[in-house]
Image (cartoon, helix red, strand yellow):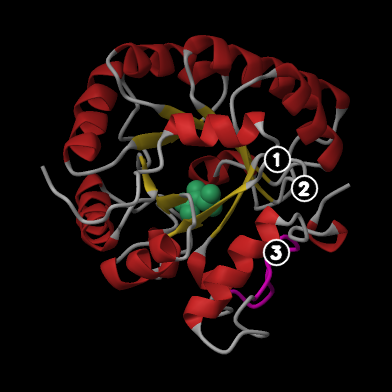
Amino acid sequence: MSIKSDKDLITISTLKRLKEKGEKFACLTAYEATIAEKISKSGIEVILVGDSLGMVIQGHDSTLPVTMENLIYHLKCVVRGNINSHIMADMPFMSYSTDHLALENATKLMQNGAHSIKIEGGTWICKLTSILAERGIPVCAHMGLTPQSINRIGGYFVQGRDVNKKKNMIEEAKALEDAGAEMILLECVPDDLTADILEKITIPVIGIGAGQRTDGQIMVIHDLLGISCLEKSPKFVKDFLKDSSSIEEAISNYSKSVKNKSFPSDNHTFF
Ligand code: KIV
């Protein structure tokens, strides 16, 4: 048994309890130990070892080149720095393209310290979600703008604006919950769609560019620190370092702003 802290580990049950009490939780990406420790120390509930590492760490223009090997390397670094946050690990592009591959790769992530895994998709990941959930692997289903499908989507823009797409996404979220997903992550969707999804499902919903109503918020750490290489930041991004005197303070201000519901504001929301 490893005893790193007397603080209780944040689990899926903790997140569900926070949702029941109407309290928001904060999530951030991390890819290495030092930042992971600062994030966990500041009381951020969830650390995502995201495949965004392909863009912010490796300098690619999409998440597609990220491999299982890359993900496991960064996961191990984060696990060493983490104190008691819940660690979610992304399953990279094509690492869950068949049920067999998905089981094998999700097992590797869990055995290397992840507490849950995240996969992108809608209806097509329902069966896979059941398979993983039945075997004890908590799944977060990433919906809306799914960066691994960027070549099909055609760009990084808001999803679910038209009536049919909206209806589909609401049904897909419900189907994913019924399949055993423990959480849904919504990326880049309009506020009213977020509201409709929240009404239909009971599991925690994490948002990025999905408005203020979600149970949790997530940001890429590089965006929070204002050091992303993008020429123009997406609307939902806020540089918290600008008004803070240190990285620790920026992370803590983000956490406070999520919990007191001042972030995201209408300025960061798609309507
Ligand atoms: O990989 C990642 O960092 C993500 C977030 C954008 C949610 O999936």
Residue 230: within the magenta? Answer: yes
* Residues at circles 3 and 2 in contact by the CB criterion of under 8 Å: no
Image position of 125 with respect to 154: above or below: above
Residue drawn 65% across the image and 85% down it: 242
Residue 75 locus on image (x, y percent): 26, 53
Label 2: which residue? 211
Q: Which segment is the magenta one?
A: 229-239
Relative to 190, 26 lies left or right: left
- The question of residue 50 being in magenta is answered with no
- Residue 142 can be seen in this image: no
Q: CA distance from mark 2 to mark 1?
A: 7 Å
Q: CA distance from mark 3 to mark 1?
A: 18 Å
Secondary structure under badge 1?
Answer: loop
Which disc, if any, is residue 151?
none
Amino acid type, label 3: Pro
Residue 214: assigned label: 1
164 versus 147 height, above or below: above
The image shows residue 29 at horizontal and vertical percentages of 45, 58
Whole-number angstrom distance, CA of label 3 to CA of label 2 = 13 Å
Question: Is the Cβ of the residue at disc 2 closer than 8 Å to that at disc 1?
Answer: yes
